Image: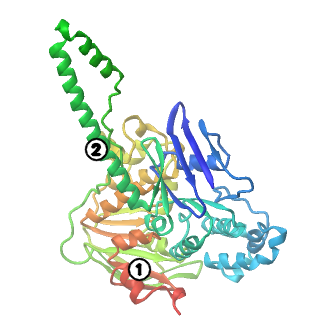
Amino acid sequence: MVTIKNLAIGFSGAHLFESANFVINPEDKIGLMGRNGSGKSTFLRCLLHDLEPDEGAIHIPSGYRIGHLAQHIAFEHSLVIDEVCSVLSEERQYEGWKGESILMGLGFTVEDMLEDPNDFSGGEQVKIQLAKLLLAEPNMLLLDEPTNYLDIHSVRWLKSFLGKWDGEIILITHDRDFMDSIVSHTLNIHRGQLKKIPGATGDAYAHIMVEEEHYEKTRQNVAKQREKTEAWIKRFKAKASMAKRVQSRVKLLEKQAQQEKLSEIDSLDFVFNEAPVIQKGMLAVVDNLSFSYDKTPLIPPVSLEIGPHDRICVIGKNGKGKSTLLKLLVGELTPVSGSVSMHDRVALGYFGQMNIERLRPSDTVYEAMQEAAPTSSQTAVRQVCAHMLFPGGLANKPVSVLSGGEKSRVMLGKILLQPTNLLLLDEPTNHLDLDACESLLDAIQCFSGAVIMVTHSEYFLHQVATKLIVFDADTISVFDGSYADFLQQVGWSDEKG
């Protein structure tokens, strides 16, 4: 049992949160919620004793082990399986099979396990690090955005694995479906308070709403009573016979703290700038499109029609060509064969995973966004900056100091400045918090044009998809229907039988 007493954490004299008191009980699975910058990762650092709190304490039992999915990766062994099994103590050496089982669940083949971990992509290296953490079997797992680099198969496996985990978990994730399927409680950082709430994200949001409604009703009642008291004082202050009673009520008002009206919380305001919707015909026709890198086939021939209001989600394992397909559609790559024919009035808005790296470090947020719409007025660009949570002077921050989430907001802001009737989004939720993801989802659902989105979030898939492009078992197929229909009627090849 881990006990948090009167915990307060802040920077530069301002508290992120204070007076936090709660207990993490055996087998608690907790989702840590809060906006970017609210202190979620900072709280994890305190649990790991990497950071001392300003006030209060965290009491961790002697011998209690906390495992953390590290962001900085360094490998010490030349084989994947040896690297993963290096966490086993001498008494557990016979449990190497567990390491193999975890790696297979994360998508590694037997052949992969005998490769050098340094030869894998960044995303695969994160999986190796995750496998080490899970095999170590600590009492508590601290997972900070574990799904960011996992494909949908690995996410589904990890969801199942963590659901059966018999220790404690504290999880930060932008994937609401993933969080809700695992957690028993939430820890919510909101308005400078860190509170433990039973239930999943819906319960946490409902709890906040009830608390804030109660606060506002109480504030209004207290304000009305104060007005009555002030009116009474004004009425009788000139009467000598009432002097003592008047003075008594004046002192009472002085002691009574005035409750301020709750301030509005800044939130992302996604409103896509819509170009005229094409009413007749197709936005695009993909005919027998294929692509290879160095003569190695990546995308076998695929054909597809994109209608004016389609909601198409691209799904499958990492490294199979999902992002490449979007690059072919926008013309960043040339196909080996086949063609993409766009309607002459198509207006594209494209968010690519790697496009974030194309931002010039020396540019300010304003300059980076203004580049997307050079004819837009300064007022219009700064308005979009504010919608992306860069109001006023924050729009002058250089790109070089931005976090991953802030860079994602800049790239999304660039799309908002461009009139579009066809959105292509490649994993747009990476680095966004839960609230930002909900805002993006609302904007996609309100967008009247067509959307093609690569995502590993089953929450987004269930909410958005009316058609799927499925990369599975070295093939590409088009499924006309929702994600739920796909799971029921087709399913993933490695989950059959």
The image quadrant that residue 125 belongs to is: bottom right
Q: Nearer the viewer, mark 2 or mark 1?
A: 1
Q: x and y percent of residue 380 in the render?
A: 28, 44
The amino acid beneath tag 1 is Ile
The crowd level at tag 1 (other Cα within 10 Å; few <14, some 14-19, many 20+) is many
- Of 190 and 154, nearer the camera is 190
- Of 421 and 134, nearer the camera is 134
Quadrant containing the N terminus is bottom right
Q: Which residue is mark 2?
A: 380
Q: Is residue 35 above or below residue 306?
A: above
- Residue at point 36%, 84% (across, down): 485
- Of 183 and 246, nearer the camera is 246
Q: x and y percent of residue 299 in the render?
A: 49, 81
- Of 64 and 496, nearer the camera is 64
Q: Is residue 147 above or below residue 270?
A: below
Helix, strand or loop under label 2: helix
Q: Residue furthest top?
A: 240
Marks 2 and 1 sit apart, C-alpha to C-alpha, by 36 Å
- Residue at point 40%, 34% (across, down): 393
Q: Is residue 246 above or below residue 367?
A: above
Q: Residue furthest front?
A: 241
Helix, strand or loop under label 1: strand
Residue 282, can we see it? yes
Q: x and y percent of residue 141 in the render?
A: 62, 61
Residue 268, can we see it? no
The amino acid beneath tag 2 is Ala
Q: x and y percent of residue 445 in the render?
A: 29, 65
The image quadrant that residue 6 belongs to is: top right
Q: Which residue is mark 1?
A: 469
- Residue at point 39%, 72% (across, down): 461
The crowd level at tag 2 (other Cα within 10 Å; few <14, some 14-19, many 20+) is few
